[in-house]
Image: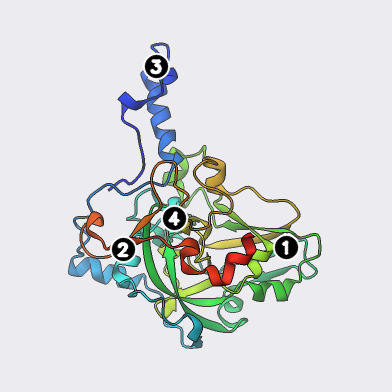
């Protein structure tokens, strides 16, 4: 089930295939290479049909019902069918808990209660939010957003949360705050497996936005999905949602938000700057170096290559909201 792009030995770069480089060295290189990319899932997803037991275990991950949210009518119809929750919640990217899509069970190790989200840096009112704040301080709304991963699969998901700009109003950035850095939960004891094989990766997972992007109407912090609090595999208790950008910009399980003057580094851009740009807007005409972005597959039933294919749309179809950020 590995989606990771690992080159077979015969494709190893010349300099690594020289005799003086030991077999061990090559092994180490291959291990490291696995960290170098999100990839196209070229593997079968046979076995995605859950047993009754599996379905029961999966449903246990779904979180508590949320009852204090309104439906945002602007985003109540994504002009595409909603992705079935059973598919969305077991086809995840969350490298801290494993390198396949099938991390939902392992991600249950994530400790989410208590939780602290610290907001600091170039702001007038630094704040630390706890779980109660995340669920009650800001009015919660549901937004159905299209979601597009850089790997060329897509979903339609009903998030529950609040606009990122609510945080801006609360902490009041100073005029020298130009960028925002977001950091995910990380604890080597808990995310140990991947931490050992991929210790060269720039943990914790971190992302960044221009402050104007964070202030955009679409930029959202989600604390729930499908009417319930966020399952751990989706990034409990709070994750970023930026529907006009590739999914990797939407860091999960946020513990820290830092307002800064300079553009921060980001996790994937540090690993492979050529493949994962800071801006990372959905752009059908800008190919990923290893695949085209012109088409996308809607996560669904059966084999991934059988999923409905459709054209990718610039800014994932959200140009009317965000295009003027990029002129
Ligand atoms: N902390 C963290 N956040 C992350 C990732 C990750 O590996 N770790 N993967 C990203 C990628 S590549 C995608 S496509 C989305 C997937 O979100 P989902 O599993 O909830 O659909 O999460 C993003 N946020
Ligand atoms: Mo992704």
| Disc 4 target residue | 284
| Among the two numbered marks 4 and 2 on one chain, the one whose residue lies closer to the N terminus | 4
Q: Secondary structure at mark 1?
A: strand
Q: 175 left or right of 19?
A: right
Q: Nearer the viewer, residue 267 or 126?
A: 267
Q: Nearer the viewer, residue 314 or 27?
A: 314
Q: Position of residue 84 (x, y in %)?
A: 30, 72
Q: Judge the density around disc 4: few (<14), some (14-19), many (≥20) Cα neighbours within 10 Å.
A: some
Choose top left, top right, bottom left or bottom right for residue 300: bottom left
Q: 148 left or right of 183?
A: left
Choose top left, top right, bottom left or bottom right for residue 258: bottom right
Which residue is the extreme one toward the top? 20
How far apart are the two marked residues, 1 and 3, measured between alpha carbons?
Answer: 47 Å
The disc label shown at residue 120, or none: 1
| Disc 2 target residue | 299
Residue at 39% from the left image edge and 54% from the top image edge: 294
The disc label shown at residue 221, or none: none
Front disc: 4 or 1: 4
Instruction: Let me know if residue 163 appears in the view.
Output: yes
How far apart are the two marked residues, 4 and 1, measured between alpha carbons?
Answer: 36 Å
The disc label shown at residue 22, or none: 3
Residue at 53% from the left image edge and 77% from the top image edge: 161
Q: Judge the density around disc 3: few (<14), some (14-19), many (≥20) Cα neighbours within 10 Å.
A: few
């Amino acid at each position: 089930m590995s989606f990771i792009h690992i080159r077979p030995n015969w494709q190893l770069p010349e300099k690594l295939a020289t005799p003086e480089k030991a077999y061990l060295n090559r092994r180490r290189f291959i291990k490291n290479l696995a960290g170098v990319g999100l990839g196209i899932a070229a593997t079968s997803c046979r076995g995605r049909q859950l047993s009754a037991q599996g379905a029961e275990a999966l449903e246990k991950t779904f979180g508590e019902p949320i009852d204090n949210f309104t439906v945002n009518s602007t985003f109540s119809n994504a002009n595409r069918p909603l992705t079935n929750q059973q598919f969305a919640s077991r086809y995840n990217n969350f490298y801290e808990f494993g390198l396949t899509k099938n991390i939902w069970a392992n991600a249950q190790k994530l400790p989410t209660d208590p939780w602290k989200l610290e907001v600091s840096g170039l702001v007038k009112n630094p704040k630390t939010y706890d779980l109660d704040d995340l669920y009650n301080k800001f009015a919660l709304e549901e937004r159905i957003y299209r979601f597009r991963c850089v790997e060329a699969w897509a979903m339609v998901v009903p998030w529950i949360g609040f606009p990122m700009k609510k945080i801006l109003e609360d902490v009041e950035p100073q005029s020298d705050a130009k960028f925002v850095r977001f950091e995910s939960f990380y604890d080597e004891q808990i995310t140990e497996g991947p931490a050992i094989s991929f210790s060269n990766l720039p943990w914790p997972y971190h992302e960044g936005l221009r402050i104007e992007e964070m202030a955009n109407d679409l930029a959202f912090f989600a604390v729930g999905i499908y009417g319930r609090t966020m399952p751990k595999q989706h990034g409990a208790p709070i994750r970023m949602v930026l529907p006009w950008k590739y999914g990797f910009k939407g860091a999960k399980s946020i513990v820290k938000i830092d307002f800064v003057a300079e553009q921060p580094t980001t996790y994937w851009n540090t690993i492979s700057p050529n493949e994962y740009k800071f801006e990372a807007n959905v752009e059908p005409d800008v190919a990923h170096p290893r695949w085209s972005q012109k088409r996308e597959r809607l996560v669904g039933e059966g084999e991934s290559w059988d999923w409905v294919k459709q054209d990718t749309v610039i800014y994932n179809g959200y140009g009317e909201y965000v295009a003027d950020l990029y002129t």
